[in-house]
Amino acid sequence: MKNRYVVIMAGGKGERFWPQSRLKRPKHLLPIVGNTAMLSQTIERLEGLVPPERVFVITNLEQRKAVLETCPSLLPERVIGEPEGRDTAAAVGLAALLVEKEGDDSAFALLPADHVIENGEGFRATLQSAFEVAESEDVLVTVGIKPTFPSTGYGYLEKGKPLDLPVSAPLSQVNRFVEKPDLKTAQVYLEDGSYFWNAGMFVWRPSVILAEINRLAPKLSLGLSELKTGWVDSGDLEQAMAKIYPSLEKISIDFAVMEKADEVVMVESGFDWDDVGEWPAIGRHYPKDENGNVFKGAGLAIDSSDNLTFSEDGHCISLLGVKDLIVVQSGDATLICHKDCAQQVKELARRACDLHPELG
């Protein structure tokens, strides 16, 4: 059997969980849920599926040192720092070049660094099926998550024709990728039963994904070819990336390829999943008091309900007569916002850092 690889995407600017997360201390390097960094949890989840020496991490140059310090099991030469973020399609292309260089057109899984998955055994079983499909068929494999509530924060996959291949997980064609819906549409998707959350997890061989990028995103493909040539000629990936990577087309892999590709296969997940994309999601993973308040760190509440607080270093957040608030104390900054405004934290973080660069 050919070797298998995993490429973990660990970029980001640390804005959605500001002020706890910062540019040099983003979500995946923090114990947002649990007691260890999200990236560490992702790597530990791979045990028994792929050995540490076949795990790559694509991060940004400013976070590379912190990634290596946080996850000492990673080989330094497998931790690649982007000189500039160019969205997920460029990262996917880079990942394919990294694995392609290993030889044998080995399949690789592309995984986000910061998802919450408690059922590691189910996760590995699902990825095992995805690898088997990607190794035997010229298809793009994605993982679909059975929705448990009408989420407006996730994209969806519409399940198509079931496929009969000798793997343990249910398989089907993907009819289409659907952008984040409004609440009414999300409720329809939940009741329909043929729509799955798009987890942003993919498995494919380098030859297959690079061919699809060439067919559907030729501008990006040309840039990746230049990057590969520069890497081969110089023998230095970092040097080649510094010269070429910032000019790669900036587009997501869903827009560039997945929404237009013909041969997309969905493996139905056999595990729990949450991408904890904003502060209110934390409340799903910690106990609530009798009034629905969640405290991570020291806190107390009187005549208050359905609030979420986070504090560091023994700092006590005290609530009196308030409802549906998020209160976060972290280092030199404090966030107070209504839960309904959680998706605007990114914008608030950007403005705060523009005014006070030391908060970034």
Image: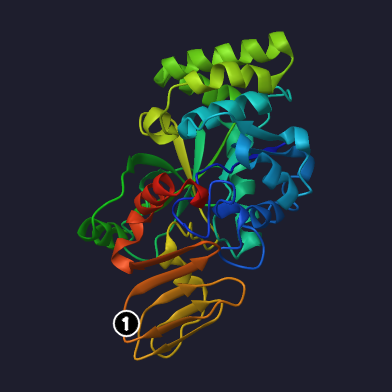
Q: Which residue is mark 1?
A: 322
Q: Position of residue 333 (x, y in %)?
A: 48, 62
Q: Judge from the rendering whether residue 298 lies leftward or rightward of residue 128; answer left or right.
A: left
Q: Position of residue 208 (x, y in %)?
A: 55, 25
Q: Position of residue 264 (x, y in %)?
A: 44, 35
Q: Judge from the rendering whether residue 232 lies leftward or rightward of residue 26; answer left or right.
A: right
Identify the residue shown where x is 56% and y is 31%.
Answer: 137
The amino acid marked with disc number 1 is: Val
Q: Position of residue 74 (x, y in %)?
A: 76, 44
Identify the residue shown where x is 48% and y is 30%.
Answer: 86
The front one of 315 and 123 is 315
Is disc 1 placed on a helix, strand or loop? loop
Dividing the picture into quarters, in which one does residue 160 lie? top left
Q: In the rendered image, is residue 130 in sight?
A: yes
Dividing the picture into quarters, in which one does residue 62 lie? top right
The front one of 55 and 50 is 55
Q: In the rendered image, is residue 167 in sight?
A: no
Identify the residue shown where x is 56% and y is 51%.
Answer: 26
Q: Residue furthest left?
A: 184
The front one of 177 and 227 is 227
